[in-house]
Image (spheres, rainbow, N blue to C red):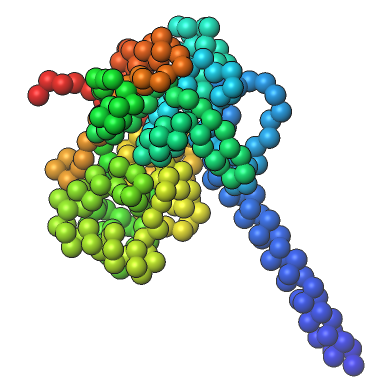
Amino acid sequence: MSIFRTKISRAVATTLIAPALFAASLAHAAVSQEQFFPPWSHGANNPVQTHGLEFTVPEVDNLPDFHGDPCTAKLVVFVGGNYFFAMAPLVTEFIKEHPEFKEKVYYETIPPGLLVDQIKHNGTITVGNMTWTAHADVYAGGLKRVNGVISDGYAKGPAVPYATNTLTIMIPKGNPAHITGLTDLGKPGVRLVMPNPAFEGIGRQIKASLAKAGGEDLVTSVYTTKVNDGETIMTHIHHRQSPLYLMLGRADAGVTWQSEAIFQEEVGNPISHVAIPDDQNATAIYAAVALKAAPHRKAAQMWVDYLRSPQALAIFEHYGFKPYSDKK
């Protein structure tokens, strides 16, 4: 009888303890993964707002790509999210030179195509349940996109180029899928997170690099076959989704700008990267322009001029950008 009771007790204990252990493991996973959710700069990526209630809940309420107070801003910058991490030090240095803009800079770092759509909607945007309006003074993004804003009549131009960037393959730290180059991205079983060309200009440049490395078959594998098979996740905002999905184990690799990988490694996130050879790579030219409808035209031109200053270019170079030169 005692043996029977012992077996029953063990069975009951297992029934009761197993769910508790499972719940505890989930709680531990949630705590350990919380660091993966943006914003990633531990409070240092927003130098433009230093007062008021602090309410940031990673994964739930964080709005990482909207910075500052649009209601009191004296300079509003719409900048493509490819260098969201550089904006805080850029703003900090700008304010050192122009202290009148302290806590008066508002900037957004969503993909450049979406920023153009926001401009076309008179600066109004909705995120979740919140809708607000920010009238941009400056638009910054890829040179082609900036020239498009000019040709659409939203800016007079000319576009002002200031820095360049190249692609890399972003991977989880340790490279568990053993990625060595672009051709590995087409292999069955390799899970990818890739920018959607419909929303992000980098997608078109990635396709061109894939074609250089493996022809149109590789492009089709990554952007059609794997999408249909569920092995490629397509993003709307790759500078947030790509590193996050890699850190959460949802993907094995994704192509991003090299500066984004450098930033992730610098802040200590478990991210690494595999270099893409020059003959397979693509170079982006970043440019800016003051908008015709800028409420703060003088401030807009000050920011555009500042982007080509030694102080600004030193910040860009820290993250792997190169100063733009029109010399062939």
Q: Nearer the viewer, residue 250 or 290?
A: 290
**Quarter of the rendering containing residue 114:** top left
Q: Is residue 15 left or right of residue 72?
A: right
Q: Is residue 273 visible?
A: no
- The residue most toward the bottom is 1
Residue 266 spot, x, y in % from top left: 44, 33
Q: Is residue 322 visible?
A: yes
172 is higher (above) or lower (below) than 100: below
Q: In the rendered picture of this protein, how many numbered marks are placed on residues?
A: 0
**Residue at the spot x=51%, y=27% of the render?**
134
Q: Nearer the viewer, residue 289 or 207?
A: 289
Residue 90 spot, x, y in % from top left: 43, 19
Residue 143 spot, x, y in % from top left: 25, 30
Q: Is residue 1 left or right of residue 281?
A: right
**Residue at the spot x=25%, y=47% of the render?**
204
Q: Assign the C terminus to one quadrant of the image.
A: top left
**Quarter of the rendering containing residue 6:** bottom right
Residue 67 spot, x, y in % from top left: 54, 28
**Quarter of the rendering containing residue 141:** top left
- The residue most toward the right is 1
**Residue at the spot x=56%, y=24% of the render?**
70
Q: Is residue 98 left or right of residue 260?
A: right
**Residue at the spot x=85%, y=89% of the render?**
3
118 is higher (above) or lower (below) than 155: below
Q: Assign the N terminus to one quadrant of the image.
A: bottom right
80 is higher (above) or lower (below) than 193: above
